Image (cartoon, rainbow, N blue to C red):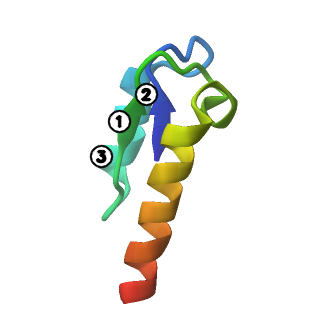
Amino acid sequence: MIWGTRDVLVPVALGRTLAAAIPGAKYHEIPRAGHVVMVDAPAAFNRLVLSFMKESEAV
């Protein structure tokens, strides 16, 4: 899960709670990003997604 620290629509606390409830979930916060993280911080978002995809290939 990738969350923006400035998400006013869905608070960070809820993101953390959801991630904790999903077995094996990974949670990342991107500073200064809002609800649409991929638009607010595309480089950081893409880096995390690509890293996740590489990990998935190894499994």
Looking at the picture, tell me which residue is in the foreground, 38 or 2. 38
Query: For the point 42% across and 63% down, which residue is it?
Result: 51
Query: For the point 49% across and 39% down, which residue is it?
Result: 44
* Mark 3 vs 2: CB contact within 8 A: no
Question: What is the CA distance from the residue labelled 1 to the residue labelled 2?
Answer: 5 Å
Local crowd at mark 2 within 10 Å, few (<14), some, or many (≥20)? few
Label placed on residue 14 = 2
Q: Position of residue 3 (x, y in %)?
A: 48, 33
Question: What is the CA distance from the residue labelled 1 to the residue labelled 3?
Answer: 5 Å
Amino acid on which disc 1 is placed: Thr
Amino acid on which disc 3 is placed: Ala
First in sequence: mark 3 vs mark 2 = 2
Left or right relative to 2: residue 46: right
* Mark 1 vs 2: CB contact within 8 A: yes
**Helix, strand or loop at disc 3?**
helix
Query: For the point 52% across and 57% down, which residue is it?
Result: 49
**Helix, strand or loop at disc 2?**
helix
**Which residue lies under the disc numbered 1?**
17
**Helix, strand or loop at disc 1?**
helix
Corner quadrant of residue 14: top left
**Which residue lies under the disc numbered 3?**
20
Left or right relative to 5: residue 46: right
Local crowd at mark 1 within 10 Å, few (<14), some, or many (≥20)? few
Amino acid on which disc 2 is placed: Leu
Q: Position of residue 9 (x, y in %)?
A: 62, 16
Looking at the picture, tell me which residue is in the foreground, 6 or 48. 48
Vertical order, 57 against 12 (above or below): below
Q: What is the number of callouts on the image?
A: 3
Q: Position of residue 58 (x, y in %)?
A: 37, 87
Q: Position of residue 46 (x, y in %)?
A: 56, 50
Vertical order, 19 against 37 (above or below): below
